[in-house]
Image (cartoon, rainbow, N blue to C red):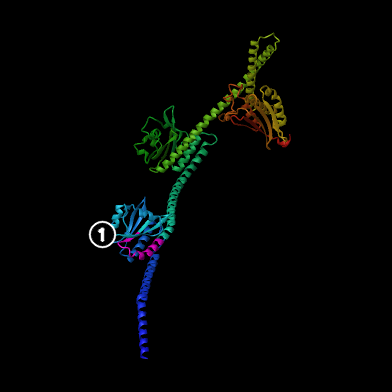
Amino acid sequence: MNEFTAYFIMGVVGAFGVYWCIKFRFVLPLEARTRDLSRSFERFTAFSREALGHSYIPDSVEHYGDITNHYLIKLHKLFPESSMLVFESSEGRWRLIDYLKNFETEPKLMTAYKWGVFDKAAGDSEIVRLENISGGSDAGAAELFRIFDIKAALLCPFMYSGAQAARILLFGGARRDFFDQAEPYLHFIVSQLNAVYKISEKVFASKKDNAQLKSELDAVVRELNMTGSRLIQRAKERKALYEVVTLGAGDEKDVKTGCAAIMNVVARMMDADVVACLLFDEAKNELVVNPGSYGISDDERMLYSLGVSNTASSSVRTFLGRKPFISADAQNDPEVITHYAKLWNVRSLMIVPIALHSRVIGVLRVGSRNKGIFTQDQLEFLSVIADELAILIEMVTLYENLSKTATELAQLNKLKDEFLSTVSHELKTPLTTIKGFVSVILSGEVGPLNEQQLNFLGVVDQSVNRLTHLISNLLDLSRLNSKVEMEFSVVNVKELIKNSVSTMLLKAKEKNIALTSVADKSLPPVHADTRWIIQVLDNLVINAIKYSGPGAKVHVSGHNKGEVVVICVEDNGPGIPLEEQALIFDKFYRCKASASQVPGTGLGLAISKSVVEKHGGKIWLESKPGAGSKFCFALPVDKERGEGRG
């Protein structure tokens, strides 16, 4: 029994010893570690909660820096033995923009360093641990780390723009035993800063865009306000000027009427008592009052004239110098001739030049019996009126000159037409006689001729033919310009084309040219003068034969285009240069390349154009150099006969 008790006691003591051994060796350290982890977790939780409570979306980079600084201050309280430096990338170097640490010598902010480790870390998204830190080849960086007594560091890149970090937080110290504790905090801070910046980037861009838009909008609003004011003022001016021009010019185009209307409007708008237009008389070398002035009788107007050599006159100075003049009291102003101010009984006075481009044609004087009532704005407005007055005077003067010139030209044109008609008729009679006698001689009826005589008479015969053709063309032009009466009838276009081609076949064979024609089956008739239209078609075919050259092809076609019938004459000749196509229908114009080689008068196409237009049609050219030419003309369909008839 005693032995059992002894063994029992020994077992209890051994178990107790084992328990405390396990407790001291394993349980107590685990409990201590658990308590440390719990305290660390609570501290990290408190830090995170406080940091998150201060987080917000910054609206500028400066506010983003404030958030960064707040995080670092909180972290420095937890790790007071650490040094925290914030660097920012700038043009390939790293500037020190912030720091937290007690130091002996204060470093300078915005100092730039060149350190390859920073460049490498900026492209990485992880925290980089440096066990043995130095400034590398940058002596400035080495000195900076010496000041802060940094032997080891954690490099934390953040504020990413794309794949590269714009800033780096350097968390360092003389020893690295607390880095493991600090690293979770750094991960948290960097994650928060990156998340905030990612959102902030859009805010920054948005704010920048908004600021730019606001600036642009403010500028637009200011411009609109200014423009609105100008438009209102301009509208008032234009309204008055429109009234002036409408009433002043009238149907009679009378300068006196127009000026009188302007003077009345100016007097009404300016509350003026006297408004006068003084125009320069070149014959007298004087400024004289124009009829139609406001507030001045004809007797007073005759008394007022100024030689342009009298520079004591404000009107003369304005005329010569083109500089507007204003006076608050003209009767006591040394720059005004008192006699004329008293003659018109004016106190307030404005004078502006009446100028058209670089030429001054007179001055506009506005006066009031009251002192000091005119302003600079009114002076500027008066200048605008003077510009309009100059235009009106010039317009009326030009109208009078144009009317006079038009009348003279009409008379000359009539004389020209009469002369052409008379001369052409007078020339036709002797030419017919010459042609007849030359034909008789060439026939041998009056005796034999040698070869040279035959050649000479052949040249005479050809020249007579050309001259006869020229006279016929001139007579045709004269008739067309004299509004010749067309003898319209229903014309079958197919027959027209057929007859013209038949007539020209012989000429085409002489030139070794293939002449063909085709017309649409349902080709409606046109309302035309057969004689003139056949002349147009013959002109186009003859030109194609003459200018396309031997071995060429000429094709005449007729097409039904609904409202019109289009007739075309096409060849595969040398074509017409682009620069000459616009001139081809002008009178007497001939293409430069063929003018000396092919005989002609240069009137055929001009006559054709006039004839087609008198029929209410249109003629045109389609040509490419080296690819032939195509002349077409369109004639309206005869509506009464209906479309579709051949």
Q: Nearer the viewer, residue 13 or 547?
A: 13
The location of residue 55, given as percent across then percent down, is 40, 63
Above or below residue 409? Residue 440 is above
The residue lying furthest to the top in this view is 447
Q: Is residue 176 magenta?
A: yes
- The number of discs equals 1
Which kind of residue does numbered mark 1 sit on? Glu
Q: Which residues are magenta?
A: 170-192
Task: Farthest residue to the bottom: give it.
Answer: 1
Which quadrant of the rendered structure holds the C terminus?
top right
Residue 194 painted magenta? no
- How far from the left and from the top, in percent, is residue 574? 60, 27
Mark 1 lies on residue: 104
- Give the image quarter of residue 598: top right
393 lies above or below 102: above
Q: Secondary structure at mark 1?
A: loop
**Residue 518 percent location from the top left of the image:** 70, 31
Residue neighbourhood size for the residue with mark 1, other residues' Cα within 10 Å, grouped as few (<14), some (14–19), many (≥20):
few
Quadrant in which the N terminus is drawn: bottom left
Splitting the image into 4 quarters, where does residue 510 fall? top right
Q: Nearer the viewer, residue 32 or 348?
A: 32
Say if residue 374 shows up in the picture: no
For this view, does 602 lie left or right of residue 267?
right
Q: Is residue 378 left or right of residue 578?
A: left
Front position in the image: 27 or 277: 27
